[in-house]
Image (spheres, coloured by chain):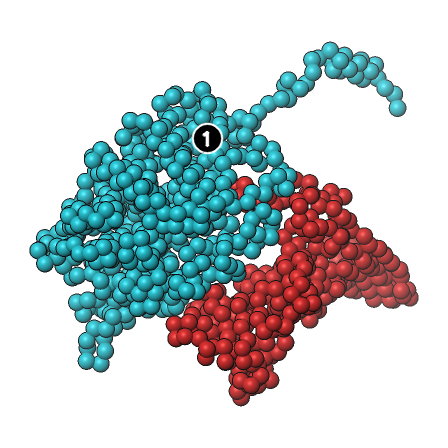
């Protein structure tokens, strides 16, 4: 083969170029432009804002678990078995209180540690950052510390002592599992951490009382009022509930009261005149809301369709009757909306409402069967409290906001504090504010609450919360926290708080079930973790 | 060789796993290939070739994570020696991955007397309800009974590995490995005058597969679907020697006879696959030339025609871990091809 002169010449030329050109690494050492890696993020203010959006999106993903799974399913007011619509209900093992080492309800601590790690990362990267203005940085840090306290408070109430993960070891490059195992802290340590994060949140928020100082969204981002509400919730809990080595501390009542009064007075909040308006999907972020989780068309839908009958395979629609005797058909207009009844409340809860109470029909839609004489017999209920709206195409979309804190909750919590202080006048005042709004035009002296002794008041507050906060994640915490006598037996062990006369948990044999067990897979893979005591 | 996989981290770190070099993995085996001409006469011609491989996978080493044998995953079961337990399956140093673990189905309780009076079965019910033998059930209070299931004639008998009268998560056995030890294939080419018959087969031997779809339908676990014809082979007082436990709507809300990984639905997955069979005919030279062609060949081919297997699953080729309602996959679609090959 002949090698032409041109070939030799051009190869020599190329070699020359290669030898004289500078090292390639400068041109090759590039960061990606079309996506972010951990080295290229955390450089601008927009990065921090986007991250805050992401944190709240994660909170939305965890909202159902926080509200329904942790806050409601164990409250004794859910049915287990078949719904009125004919479908089998979900969450049966949790609602039946069937907890043991094999049945843990949720796994991996409810997947909350991923969300906590995201908060830890924000704190690690932004606390000393200079790419974001001081005012905005402090506001965001107020949000993040508040949310971390929120998550750890859920973990504390559900599991007692939990591992206190406050760092970002894996992101910093630690991959050796033997160094990553973290044992469960004691309940007292967890409570100390929660209070510390709440304090930091308040400091960072400073004087910014606005719900939306940076135009990111009104009342759907964590705000100072939410932190103060959470402080009220945490300190009231800590004043009444003893968990492990963390004994109840009655001094915390005053702190709770102080911050809840701040919420009532300092944020321009007021009760809506009409109870149904609070959850109206066209009236989001109204005057009563403190903090809610946003759902919207084209963004995300909630799962409240699981409390409603189904058109298609459900049996209510063509065989049941409404309260006025007419055929059921489809009063909530859910045809094509994908509802499927997987959760239903017990009849006892529906029966608690007076007919004059506007909350009854704003919350529930009852279905009836007809017996041989044509009399209506109760069949089941469907929850219509938060069912979104009918969109432009005529289909119902489940886009109602999930409310975490609102003003009437603050009032009833203040009522509980007043009961602990023995202040009957205040107990009456707070309960009646809420009742008066509920009864609307039907308000009459016969419906006014009159205070009695501690037990009567405590049970009355529970009854009021039962009617006011259906689907809002209160009952399980309420019956764990409230007591039959001051400093006495938690209501979860009494028959007064139960709907079928049998205490929800048997104090002699099931006291350990106040806390949830952790799953076997978690224990098998992490040497340092121990099972919740009693399982 | 290095194994590159998702390496599990403690979940309290906020991460479930990270992909990295995950230890060392070894396959050892022997492969044999043969081909030959079996028959050659003037009109007949028969060639065959085939290969067979024996392979066994062993995990040599795993990243140090403080657990015994640096175990990742796995199940804890009784050894049969009192309350002693061991971890089996998952990834463990020195062991073969792909182990199937499940309950041992020991038949059906045909009468009330056969049921141990104080038996307690703690697993199988999706709502966490325990199942009790007759005496144990009668000893419960009415509210406890509402939260419990009575074991009745027709329910499955599970082997109590440690003999303590309680069936729990540890009372399981190693069923077998889900990766074939022997794999291979062969093809044959048979020619008679102008006809050619070609067949291609492959096989996998010595492994277990699990029938996931059947228990879900048989136990009506969704609620509104129809059930399978196996329901005629379920225990009733008139049919006491049936193969399957008594039929219950929503088995996962009852005694969980079907709602658990067990030997009842585990099968040897050995299969022979009819991968391709092709019959072709080449036109005699003289006729082809008359049509101004050098050669013409017509053929009909069938592909993925089916399996010769004892396992009643749609696709024995796919390795399945167990679990209810994860399905056994769909069979590969059968294809029929018609071909004409013309040379000018």
Q: Could you tell me residue A204's position as x and y percent?
A: 36, 28
Residue under pointer 1: A123
Q: Can the viewer see residue A465?
A: yes
Q: Quadrant of residue A177?
A: top right
Q: Is residue A293 left or right of residue A414?
A: right
Residue lying furthest bottom in this view?
B238
Q: In the picture shown, does residue A353 fall above or below A43?
A: below
> Can you say whether B244 is above or below A354 in the image?
below
B4, A24: nearer the viewer: B4
Rendering quarter of residue A24: top right
Residue B96 percent coordinates (x, y): 73, 55
What percent of the width, then of the height, locates residue B254? 47, 72
Chain in red on the image:
B
Q: Residue furthest left?
A: A445
Q: Residue at x 33, y 58 (%)?
A: A489
Q: How many marks?
A: 1
The answer to whether A216 is drawn above or below residue A462 in the figure is: above
Q: Colour of chain A?
A: cyan
Element assignment for label 1: helix
Query: In which quadrant is the N terminus of chain A drawn?
Result: top right
Depth check: A397 or A395 in front?
A: A397
Residue at 19% x, 40% y: name it. Answer: A270
Residue A348: image location, x then y, percent: 26, 65
Mark 1 is surrounded, within 10 Å at the Cα level, by few (under 14), some (14 to 19) or many (20 or more) other residues, namely some
Give the camera-side residue of A408 and A37: A408
Residue at x-position 19% and y-position 47%:
A423
Q: Residue at x 27, y 40 (%)?
A: A254
**Chain letter of the residue carrying label 1:** A
Q: Residue A443 falls in which quadrant of the image?
A: bottom left
Of A212 and A327, which appears nearest the observer?
Answer: A212
Q: Can the viewer see residue A274 in this picture?
A: no
């Amino acid at each position: 083969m002949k090698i032409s002169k041109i070939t030799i010449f051009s190869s020599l030329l190329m070699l020359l170029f290669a030898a004289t050109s500078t090292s390639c690494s400068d041109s090759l050492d590039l960061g990606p432009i079309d996506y972010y890696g951990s080295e290229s993020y955390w450089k601008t203010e927009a990065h921090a804002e986007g991250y805050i959006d992401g944190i709240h999106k994660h909170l939305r993903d965890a909202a159902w678990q926080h509200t329904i799974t942790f806050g409601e399913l164990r409250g004794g007011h859910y049915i287990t078995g078949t719904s009125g619509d004919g479908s089998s209900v979900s969450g049966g093992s949790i609602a039946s209180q069937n907890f043991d080492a094999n049945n843990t309800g949720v796994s991996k601590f409810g997947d909350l540690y991923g969300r906590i790690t995201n908060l830890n990362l924000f704190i690690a990267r932004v606390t000393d950052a200079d790419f974001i203005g001081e005012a905005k940085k402090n506001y965001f840090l107020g949000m993040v510390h508040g949310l971390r306290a929120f998550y750890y408070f859920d973990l504390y109430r559900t599991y007692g002592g939990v591992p206190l993960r406050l760092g970002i070891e894996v992101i910093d490059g630690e991959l050796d599992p033997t160094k990553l195992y973290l044992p469960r802290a004691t309940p007292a340590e967890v409570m100390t951490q929660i209070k510390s994060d709440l304090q930091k949140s308040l400091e960072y928020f400073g004087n910014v009382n606005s719900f939306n100082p940076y135009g990111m969204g009104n009342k759907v981002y964590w705000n100072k009022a939410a932190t103060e509400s959470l402080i009220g919730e945490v300190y009231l809990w800590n004043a009444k509930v003893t968990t492990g080595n963390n004994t109840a501390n009655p001094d915390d009542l005053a702190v709770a009261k102080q911050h809840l009064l701040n919420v009532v007075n300092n944020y321009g909040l007021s009760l809506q005149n009409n109870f149904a308006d609070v959850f109206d999907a066209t009236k989001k972020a109204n005057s009563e809301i403190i903090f809610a989780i946003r759902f919207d068309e084209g963004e995300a839908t909630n799962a409240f369709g699981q409390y409603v009958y189904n058109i298609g395979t459900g049996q209510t629609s063509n065989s049941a009757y409404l309260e006025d005797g007419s055929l059921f058909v489809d009063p909530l207009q859910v045809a094509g909306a994908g509802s499927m009844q997987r959760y239903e409340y017990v009849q006892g809860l529906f029966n608690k409402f007076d007919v004059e109470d506007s909350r009854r029909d704003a919350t529930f839609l009852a279905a009836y069967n007809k017996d041989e004489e044509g009399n209506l017999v109760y069949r089941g209920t469907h929850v219509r409290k938060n069912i979104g709206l009918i969109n432009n195409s005529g289909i119902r979309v489940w886009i109602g906001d999930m409310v975490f804190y609102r003003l009437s909750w603050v009032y009833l919590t203040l009522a509980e504090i007043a009961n602990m202080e023995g202040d009957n006048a205040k107990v009456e005042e707070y309960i009646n504010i809420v009742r008066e709004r509920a009864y609307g035009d039907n308000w009459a002296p016969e419906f006014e609450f009159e205070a009695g002794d501690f037990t009567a008041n405590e049970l009355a507050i529970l009854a009021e919360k039962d009617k006011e906060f259906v689907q809002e994640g209160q009952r399980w915490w309420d019956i764990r926290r409230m007591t039959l006598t001051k400093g006495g037996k938690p209501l979860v062990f009494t028959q007064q708080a139960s709907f079928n006369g049998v205490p929800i948990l048997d104090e002699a044999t099931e006291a350990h079930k106040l806390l949830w067990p952790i799953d076997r897979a978690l224990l098998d893979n992490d040497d340092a973790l121990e099972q919740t005591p009693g399982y | 060789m290095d194994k590159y996989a998702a390496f599990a981290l403690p979940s309290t770190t906020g991460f479930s796993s990270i992909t990295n070099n995950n230890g060392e993995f070894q396959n050892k085996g022997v492969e044999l290939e043969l081909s030959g001409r079996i028959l050659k006469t003037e009109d007949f011609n028969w060639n065959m070739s085939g290969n067979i491989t024996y392979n066994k996978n062993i995990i040599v080493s795993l990243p140090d994570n403080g657990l015994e044998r640096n175990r990742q995953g796995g199940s804890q079961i009784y050894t049969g020696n009192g309350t002693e337990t061991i971890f089996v399956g998952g990834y463990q140093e020195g062991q073969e991955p792909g182990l199937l673990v499940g309950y041992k189905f020991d038949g059906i309780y045909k009468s009330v007397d056969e049921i141990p009076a104080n038996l307690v079965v703690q697993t199988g019910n999706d709502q966490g309800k325990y199942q009790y033998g007759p005496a144990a059930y009668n000893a419960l209070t009415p509210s406890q009974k509402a939260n419990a299931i009575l074991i009745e004639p027709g329910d499955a008998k599970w082997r109590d590995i440690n003999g303590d009268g309680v069936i729990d998560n540890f009372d399981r056995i190693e069923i077998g490995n889900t990766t074939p030890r022997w794999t291979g294939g062969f093809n044959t080419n048979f020619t008679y005058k102008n006809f050619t018959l070609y067949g291609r087969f492959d096989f996998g031997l010595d492994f277990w597969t699990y029938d996931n779809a059947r228990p879900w339908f048989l136990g009506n676990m969704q609620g509104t679907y129809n059930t399978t014809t196996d329901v005629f082979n379920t225990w009733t007082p008139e049919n006491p020697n049936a193969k399957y436990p008594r039929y219950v709507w929503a088995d996962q809300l009852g005694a969980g006879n079907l709602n658990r990984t067990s030997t009842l639905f585990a099968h040897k997955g050995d299969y022979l696959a009819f991968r391709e069979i092709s019959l072709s005919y080449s036109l005699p030279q003289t006729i082809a030339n008359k049509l101004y062609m050098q050669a013409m060949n017509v053929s009909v081919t069938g592909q993925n025609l089916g399996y010769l297997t004892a396992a009643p699953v749609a696709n024995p080729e796919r390795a399945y871990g167990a679990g209810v309602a994860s399905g056994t996959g769909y069979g590969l679609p059968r294809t029929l091809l018609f071909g004409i090959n013309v040379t000018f």
